[in-house]
Image (tube, grey):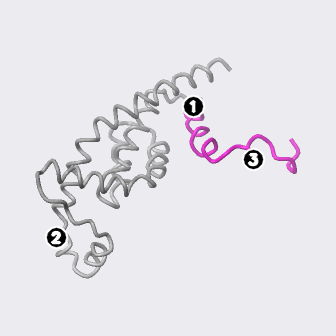
Amino acid sequence: MDPEIPGPLEKRGFWRRWVLDPVAKQLTQGVTPDKIALSIAVGSVLAIFPILGTTTTLCVIAGVVLGLNQPIIQGVNALCTFIYFPLLFAFVRLGDALAGTARSSLDVASMISLLRREPREFYHQFGTTALHGILGWAVVAPIWILAVYFIGLGPLRATARRIART
């Protein structure tokens, strides 16, 4: 192929180049569709864990313990960044409701300011908010994992069959 003329690699969009192709490559290297689906499900649920700054470490630990595909888990973790903050607020509100308490304060600017000035006071004031977020996440997490796993499993198995035929 002439390097001056864009070939199939150059014409692929973001989604195909950075999501679909790497997953298909894993299928050609012997990773089972079930393991890929589980990697996506676990990576996505840990990516939305409501304690900022913990998701990458959680994904590494889960990948090692469960024997899952680290590139897929970390890729999914990165892709879930755009849904992190809306879900963070939703998990805190769900946790508030489950705990039967008043709505937790979620003024992000004041939270960051307090964390920088007085970390101990920050944890004192917002520790309960964090626990409510974890509670909300813990209720949603099993449903999330099952839904993502089973939604992804069919297309992954179909792709694996298609790859096996070629």
85 sits to left or right of 101 = right
Magenta stretch bounds: 1-28
Q: Relative to 89, is 3 on the left or the right?
A: right
Q: CA distance from mark 2 to mark 3?
A: 51 Å
Q: Do the numbered discs 2 and 3 sit on residues whose CB atoms are within 8 Å?
A: no
For image coordinates 33% across by 57% down, the residue present is: 54
Q: Is residue 107 left or right of residue 78?
A: left
In the rendering, at what x and y percent does residue 118 appear?
A: 22, 80
Residue occupied by mark 2: 125
Label ID, residue 29: 1
Farthest residue to the left: give it.
100
Element at badge 2?
Answer: helix
Foreground tag (2 vs 3): 2
**Distance CA(mark 2)–CA(mark 1):** 49 Å
Q: Closer to the camera: disc 1 or disc 3?
A: 3
The amino acid on which the numbered mark 3 sits, given as a three-letter code, is: Glu
Residue 129 in the image: state x and y as whole percent.
20, 61
In the rendered image, the vertical position of residue 123 relative to residue 33, given as above or below: below
Label 2: how many Cα within 10 Å (few below 14, some 14–19, many 20+): some
Residue under numbered circle 3? 10
SS class, disc 1: loop
